Image (cartoon, rainbow, N blue to C red):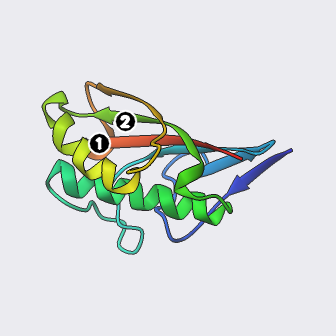
Amino acid sequence: MKKVIRTKKAPGTVGPYSQAIEVNGTLYVSGQVPLDPDTGKLTGDTITEQTEQVLKNIRFIVNAAGYSLKEIVKTTCMLQDMNDFAEMNKAYEKFFNEDPPARAAYEVARLPLNVKIEIDAIAAR
C-alpha cells in the first residue's frame, strides 16, 4: 500500500510530486535542495552549507515517516560541480559517519534554482 509522506519541517514540493512515498517498508525520498523550510529561501552559498541543509531536510522527512537516517540504504548526490566532491563528503559524513548508505554521486548540467547540490534517498526497514 502506498503512503504519501508530508511534513512542514521540510520544504514543500514545487511540482506534481511528493516529499516521500512509503511502500512495503521502503521509503523513497524525493530529491531535496537546500531550501529553508521556514522561509522557503535558499540556504548557504557554499557546498558545505548547502549539503548540510539538504541532509537536514531529508532527516526531517524520514523522521516524519517514522524512519531514521540509519535506515537510509541509498542516496544519490547530484552536484553542480564535481570539484565540490571532497567538501560535500565532509558535510555528508557528519550525517552518515557510521555504516553509511550506498551512494552514487555525479555532476549534472543544471539543478533547480541553480543550487550546488540535490540529494534523494531510499530508506528501508
Q: Is residue 69 visible in this depiction of the protein?
A: yes
**In the figure, residue 84 lies in which quadrant?**
top left
Q: x and y percent of residue 8 in the render?
A: 54, 70
| Mark closest to the chain's N terminus, 2 or 1 | 2
Query: In percent of the image, x 38 and y 55: which residue is there?
Result: 95
From the image, which quarter does the N terminus lie in?
Answer: top right
Q: Is residue 115 visible in this depiction of the protein?
A: no
Give the amino acid at mark 1.
Answer: Ile
Query: In percent of the image, x 47 and y 43: which residue is there?
Result: 99
Tags 2 and 1 touching, CB below 8 Å: yes
Q: Is residue 80 above or below residue 32?
A: above
**Residue mark closest to the camera, 2 vs 1:** 2
Query: In percent of the image, x 77 and y 45: which residue is there?
Result: 25
Query: In percent of the image, x 50 and y 71: which residue is there?
Result: 9
| Residue located beneath label 1 in the image | 117
Give the amino acid at mark 2.
Answer: Cys
Left of 37 or right of it: where is 124? right
The foreground one among 25 and 39 is 25
Q: Is residue 64 above or below residue 82?
A: below
Tell me the tag on residue 77.
2
Q: x and y percent of residue 40 in the render?
A: 37, 66
For the residues marked 2 and 1, what is the alpha-carbon distance in whole angstroms? 7 Å
> Neighbour class for label 2 at 10 Å: few (<14), some, many (≥20)?
many
Left of 88 or right of it: where is 77? right
Element carrying mark 2: strand
